[in-house]
Image (spheres, grey):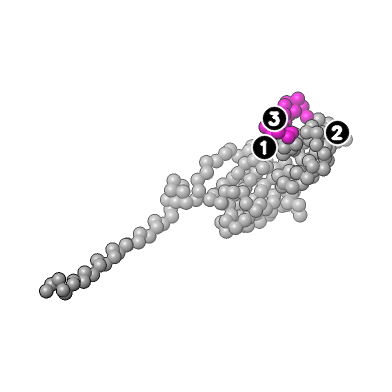
Amino acid sequence: MAESVVFEFTEAEKAEIQKHVAKYPDRKSAVMPALWIAQEKFGWLSPEAMELVASTLDMPYAQVYGVASFYTMYFKKKVPKYLFDICTCFTCGECGGDQIFKHAQNSLQVDENGHSADGKFWIRQAECLAACDTGPVMQIANRRIVHNLTPAKFDQTVDMLRRDQMPAFEPVAPKYDQASPAAKAAPEPEKVQETPPPAPEVISDSSEEE
């Protein structure tokens, strides 16, 4: 028998929400962090979880649902524990994002919803993750970015998360940053030889010569 879920915030969670409420003249403005706290607690935003947020902030359920349904980082149905957002937008796509997404589909044996065969992972394509200089990139569970993604790096990340080990924050080194290995291997830019302009021609005044 499945364990029943009690939809209540702890005193610590209520205090955290109140910190956000205190930032705004209207307590309704704290709806986004309150939704995030609810999602962290329950794993997804069921109608009951959104009703809890609505009652906590004294706002209509319809307004809470309107915010939750607008943003993709809020989950309105039960999902696997780890979400992989793989960027396939222009820059990342050109750098191999599409191929990595296909690799992820095959290696995790995902279904039509992008859920893995073991029910632990969920993949979807992202439009842009604002890290074009280190593409391809992948975001893990709305919180951690993996830069310079490759199929091998994806597999390594999956192996870590199977043990519930979140990858550490990695220093950002753009592929063509002067300190990165890729930059050292890149060819030196061609130096353009500048030819000085010819000296202006001096035209003498014949009247002065006389």
Question: Residue 22, labelled with which disc?
Answer: 3
Callout in the foreground (2, 3): 3
Q: Which residue is drawn at the image coordinates 67% and 42% (left, top)? A: 141
C-alpha separation, residue under disc 3 versus residue under disc 1 = 35 Å
Position of residue 49 relative to residue 182, above or below, is: above
- Split into 4 quadrants, where in the image is the C terminus? bottom left
Q: Which residue is drawn at the image coordinates 50% and 45% (left, top)? A: 173
Dot 3 or dot 1: first in sequence order is 3
64 vs 185, left or right, is right
Question: Which x, y percent locates residue 4?
Answer: 85, 33
Q: Nearer the viewer, residue 199 or 65?
A: 199
Question: Which x, y percent locates residue 123?
Answer: 69, 49
The image quadrant that residue 188 belongs to is: bottom left
Q: Nearer the viewer, residue 190 or 61?
A: 61
Kindly give the residue lying farthest to the right in the view shown: 1
What crowding class fits label 3: few (fewer than 14 Cα within 10 Å), some (14-19), or many (20 or more)? few
State the SS at label 1.
loop
Callout in the foreground (3, 1): 3
Q: Which residues are magenta?
A: 9-27
Dot 2 or dot 1: first in sequence order is 2
Question: Which x, y percent locates residue 72?
Answer: 72, 47
**Residue corresponding to mark 1:** 164
Position of residue 208 relative to residue 26, above or below, is: below
Amino acid type, label 3: Ala
